[in-house]
């Protein structure tokens, strides 16, 4: 029941934000998605770099 109420509240909040944003809504959506993608891709790159450095140092120690 609480999940349903929470989802309903999120829906109402999204509708209010959409009405307030008006014509700028797609621009804000693209900005949020783009910023999120940049952060996630850079974090994934950092994890991959760290894993490669760790594997490289383990090979040189052996």
Image: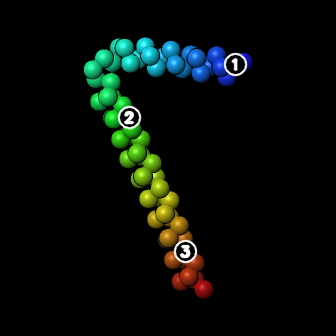
**Residue 39 screen position, x and y as percent:** 42, 46
**Residue 10 screen position, x and y as percent:** 54, 20
**Residue 51 screen position, x and y as percent:** 53, 67
> Number of callouts in the render?
3
Nearer to us of marks 1 and 2 is 1
Frontmost residue, 42 versus 20: 20
Q: Quadrant of the C terminus?
A: bottom right
The residue drawn where x is 33% and y is 35% is 31
Q: Quadrant of the N terminus?
A: top right
Q: How is the image coloured?
A: rainbow
Alpha-carbon span between mark 3 and mark 1: 46 Å
Give the label on residue 55, or none. 3
The tag earlier along the polypeptide, 3 or 2, is 2
Q: Single out the residue that lies furthest toward the bottom.
A: 62
The tag earlier along the polypeptide, 3 or 1, is 1
Nearer to us of marks 3 and 2 is 2
**Residue 50 screen position, x and y as percent:** 50, 64
- Is residue 56 depicted above or below 14 in this figure? below
The tag earlier along the polypeptide, 1 or 2, is 1
The residue drawn where x is 65% and y is 20% is 4
- Is residue 51 depicted above or below 8 in this figure? below
- Is residue 51 depicted above or below 56 in this figure? above
Residue at numbered disc 2: 32
Residue at numbered disc 1: 2
């Amino acid at each position: 029941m609480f999940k349903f109420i929470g989802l309903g509240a999120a829906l109402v909040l999204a509708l209010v934000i959409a009405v307030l944003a008006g014509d700028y809504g797609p621009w804000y959506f693209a900005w949020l998605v783009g910023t999120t993608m940049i952060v996630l891709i850079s974090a994934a790159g950092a994890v991959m770099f760290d894993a490669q450095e760790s594997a490289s140092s383990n090979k040189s120690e052996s």
